[in-house]
Image (cartoon, grey):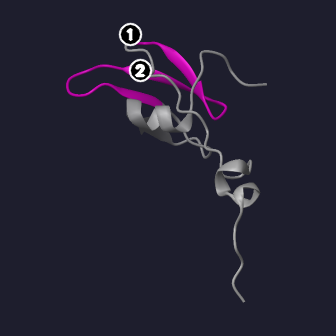
Amino acid sequence: MVRVMNESDSPASGSAAQTQPISPAPPTTPCTVVWSQGRPFVLESGAGRPRWMGMDRHGRPQALTGDELCRRGWSYRRAR
């Protein structure tokens, strides 16, 4: 049996098919603090590439690039 899709069945019309908007680029000022997924991250800029340092859910250090931070989403304020 073959099912024919009409306009109301299109994946673009469903809420599950909608993607999350990409966050704007994070700030580039050293020592800036942003929040991502309920955890703070601080921008470190030493020798080499700048990185966002924070902790994972187990308390281990976690380094993110600016692109990774954008994909995860970030804000200047902690989500409540």
Q: Nearer the viewer, residue 59 or 25?
A: 25
Query: Which numbered disc flags the more N-terminal residue, 1 or 2?
Result: 1
Magenta highlight on residue 35: yes
Question: Do the residues under discs 1 and 2 have CB atoms within 8 angstroms?
Answer: yes
Residue 50 rendering spot, x and y as whole percentages: 31, 25
Of 76 and 46, the residue lying toward us? 76
Residue 6, above or below 54:
below
Give the residue type at disc 1: Thr
Residue 17 at what x, y percent from top left? 66, 52
* Residue 13 located left or right of residue 24: right
Residue at 60% across / 21% down in the picture? 75
Q: Which label belongs to residue 29? A: 1
Q: Residues within 10 Å of mark 1 (few under 14, many from 20)?
A: few
Mark 1 secondary-structure assignment: loop
The residue at the point 58 percent across, 33 percent down is 21
Q: Which residues, given as a range, are shown in magenta?
A: 29-53
Give coordinates of residue 41: x percent, y percent: 51, 26
Q: Is residue 42 above or below residue 22?
A: above
- Quadrant of residue 59 within the rendered picture: top right
- Please tell me whether residue 34 is drawn above or below residue 16 in the rendered image: above
Name the residue beneath numbered marker 2.
43
User: Residue at the top extreme?
Assistant: 29
- Per the image, label 2 sits on a secondary structure element best described as strand
Outermost residue toward the left? 47
Taking the image as shown, residue 43 lies to the left or right of residue 78, namely left
Label 1, label 2: how many angstroms apart (C-alpha)?
7 Å
Task: Name the residue rendered at 60%, 15% in the picture.
Answer: 76
**In the rendering, at what x and y percent does residue 25 appear?**
44, 22
Check disc 2: other Cα within 10 Å, few if <14, some if 14-19, many if 20+. Answer: many
**Amino acid type, label 2:** Leu
- The front one of 24 and 36 is 24
